[in-house]
Image (tube, rainbow, N blue to C red):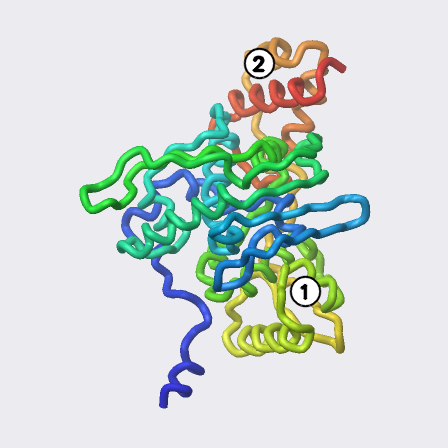
Amino acid sequence: MVGDNTKDRSPLLPDRMQQGDFFVCDIFDAAPKGDMASMEPPVFSISTKPDRNIRRYENGTNFVEITPSVKGLATVHDRDVLIFCISQIMAALNEGRAVSQILRFKAYDLLTATNRGTDGRGYEQLRGALERLSGTRITTNVTTGDVEVLDGFGLIDRFRIVRETRDGRMQEMEVALSEWVFNAIKAREVLTLHRNYFRLRKPLERRLYEIARKHCGQSVEWRIGLQKLKAKCGSHSTDKEFKRLIANIISENEAHDHIPDYTFSLEDEIFVVRSRGSVPPVREEIFDGMLDPEAYHEARTVAPGWDVHYLEQEWRRWCGRQEIEPKRPEKHFVCFCQSWHERRGAP
C-alpha cells in the first residue's frame, strides 16, 4: 500500500553529501553556521507556495518588517545560500584570512555542500533562491555587530552569474551580502548548525530547529507558548492547524529520531524543546600552545595602546567559545587584535 510505504520512509532527505568531492569547499573546514540576527524573527517563509504577505515581528522595543518581492519572500530553503556564504567567511576568519562582503564560488559547490541536487532542477531552484533573497526587503532596528540599521535592505545586495555552461547552467557566481548579515559575521554572531539540517524535508522542521538552536542552545530545556511560536515561525495557518502540524512533527521525530540535537514535545499549549546533549559544550580555551614573541610585536602595531597579554586572554577565550583551533595561531592572533582595535578604538 502507498500509505504503508510513506510511513516507512525516513523524514530525512537522502544524504547527497556523501561524495568524493565533498571536501572541496572551505565550508567543510568548519561546521555550517547561521547568523543569529535572522534566527529570532520570521525572516524566511515556511510556505511551499509564493508568500507575498508583508510581516512585522516585534520583540520588546525591537522590530523587523519583512517585505516580499513579486516573486515572494525568501524561503527557509533559500536560507541555504546564506548559510553557505556565512560558513565560507567564518572559515576564512578562523584561518586569519581577509574577507569581503562579495563572495565568488562555484554553484556546484554550493549545491553539494547544502545537500541539493545538481541536476538542471537544482540549478533552476538556486536561481530562484537568489532572486527571492535579493528581492526580500527588511526594515529593522535590530543591531548586528553593535551597528543599528534603520533603513531598508535586502538579505543579499545583489548576485551575478559570472559564467554559464552552454545549456544555461550557472558555473561561477558572485553574491554580495547585505551589511546587516556581514556585520553579524564579523562580530561572530553566528551559531553552528548540524549538517543534517540540510536533510530536513519540511520547512517548518527547519524553522523549529533554528529556533531551538537559537533559544535552547546547550541548555537542558526551553519552553514557549504555541501562539508565540507561531509568530516566530511566521505561520499563516489557523491555531488548530498549526498545532496539528507541530504534533505531526513531534510524532515523526519520536518514530525516526531525525531532528538533530533536540527533541520536541507538547504540554497543553506549551512547546517544549529538550537538548539531546549533542551540541558540544563551550570550552574556555581550546588553544593552549605558546605564541612566537614576534606575534606580540605585531599585535602592538595593529592594536596600539592595548595590553597584548590581555588581548591574548580574550583571543584564547574566544577560540574556545567558537570551538576553533587555529592552524596559524600567530597570524590568527594578530588578526583578532586588529579586529578588536577596529571595533573598539584605543583603550
| Residue 36, above or below 273 | above
Can residue 54 be seen here? The reply is yes
| Farthest-out residue, left | 166
Q: Which residue corresponds to the image point at 49% horizontal and 50% vertical from the top-left?
A: 70
Rendering coords of residue 140 (x, y %): 69, 41
Rendering coords of residue 345 (x, y %): 71, 16
Give the alpha-carbon distance from disc 2 to disc 1, as whole Å: 54 Å
Rendering coords of residue 62 (x, y %): 76, 44
Q: Quadrant of the C terminus?
A: top right
| Farthest-out residue, front | 70
Q: Which residue corresponds to the image point at 64% horizontal and 44% vertical from the top-left?
A: 37
Please identify the quarter of the rendering in which residue 152 is found: top right
- Residue topped by disc 2: 293
Viewed as shown, does residue 184 lie left or right of 10? right
Name the amino acid type tagged 1: Lys
- Residue topped by disc 1: 230
Can residue 223 be seen here? The reply is no
Q: How many marks?
A: 2
Which is nearer the eye, 17 or 243?
243
| Residue 50, above or below 313 | below
Circle 2 crowding by C-alpha within 10 Å: few under 14, some 14–19, many from 20: few
Earlier sequence position, callout 2 versus callout 1: 1
Circle 1 crowding by C-alpha within 10 Å: few under 14, some 14–19, many from 20: some
Q: Which mark is residue 98?
A: none
Disc 2 on helix, strand or loop?
A: helix
Please identify the quarter of the rendering in which residue 282 is found: top right
Viewed as shown, does residue 256 lie left or right of 209? left
Disc 1 on helix, strand or loop?
A: helix
Q: Quadrant of the N terminus?
A: bottom left
